[in-house]
Image: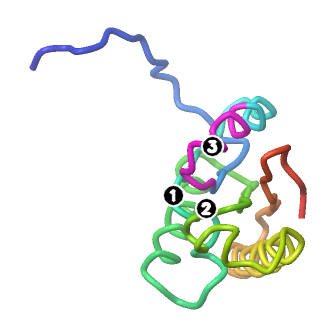
Amino acid sequence: MEKEISFRSSAEHYAADACIVWCFDDRFSGLLGEFSKTFKNFDLVKIAGGAKALAGGASPERDFVLNQIKASIRLHGTTRVVLMLHRDCGAYGGSKNFENPNTEKESQESQLTEARRFIMNEVPGVSVDAYFADFDGLYPV
C-alpha cells in the first residue's frame, strides 16, 4: 500500500469531554470549529439532521445515533452529550417548510427537548446539552 499523506497522529488513548451530535451541513462547520475549542477532546457524530433522529420514535437511525453515543461513553469515558439542530436544515425540508423563523426555531427547540429527554432516559447519569445553530451563532436550548 502506498502512503498518500504523511501525518503523525497521537497514539495515546484519550478521554472525551463530550460526544457531539452535529449536522453534516457544511455551512455550520466553522461554528463547530469554534464551539469545539471549548473541549480538550471530543467524539463527533456528524450526520444529516444532527439530533433529529433522536427526537422521533423508534427507528434504525435513532438506534444508530444512540449506539454511537454509548460507544463514546464506553470507549472514551464521555459524561456529556451535546445535541445540535440548525436553521434551514434539509432534513426538515429547509426553512421554507416553516411559517416563519420563530416557528422554525420553536419547532427545533421542541425537537431538541425531546431528544435530550430520550438520551437522559436511555443513558442515566449523562449530562445532555442542546443547541440551536443559526447563521449568526449558537443558542442553548
- What residue is rendered at 59% in x and 55% in y? 23
Task: Tell me the kind of residue under disc 1.
Answer: Ile
**Image quarter hosting the C terminus:** bottom right
Residue position for label 3: 27
Check if residue 114 falls in the magenta segment.
no
Could you tell me how many numbered marks the image carries?
3
Residue 12, percent across and down?
A: 51, 23
Task: Tell me the kind of residue under disc 3.
Answer: Arg
Are circles 1 and 2 on residues that touch, CB within 8 Å?
yes
How far is the residue under mark 1 from the one under mark 2? 5 Å
Residue position for label 1: 47
Q: Is 58 displayed left or right of 96 in the figure?
A: left
Q: Earlier in the sequence, mark 2 or mark 3?
A: 3
Q: Is residue 6 above or below residue 58?
A: above
Residue position for label 2: 50
- What residue is rendered at 52% in x and 77% in y? 62
In the depicted view, which residue is nearer to us: 101 or 77? Answer: 101
- What residue is rendered at 74% in x and 54% in y? 79
Residue 87, percent across and down?
A: 73, 60
> Predominant secondary structure in magenta?
helix
Q: Quadrant of residue 103?
A: bottom right
How far is the residue under mark 3 from the one under mark 1? 14 Å
- Image: magenta residue range: 22-33
Q: Is 5 displayed left or right of 116 in the figure?
A: left
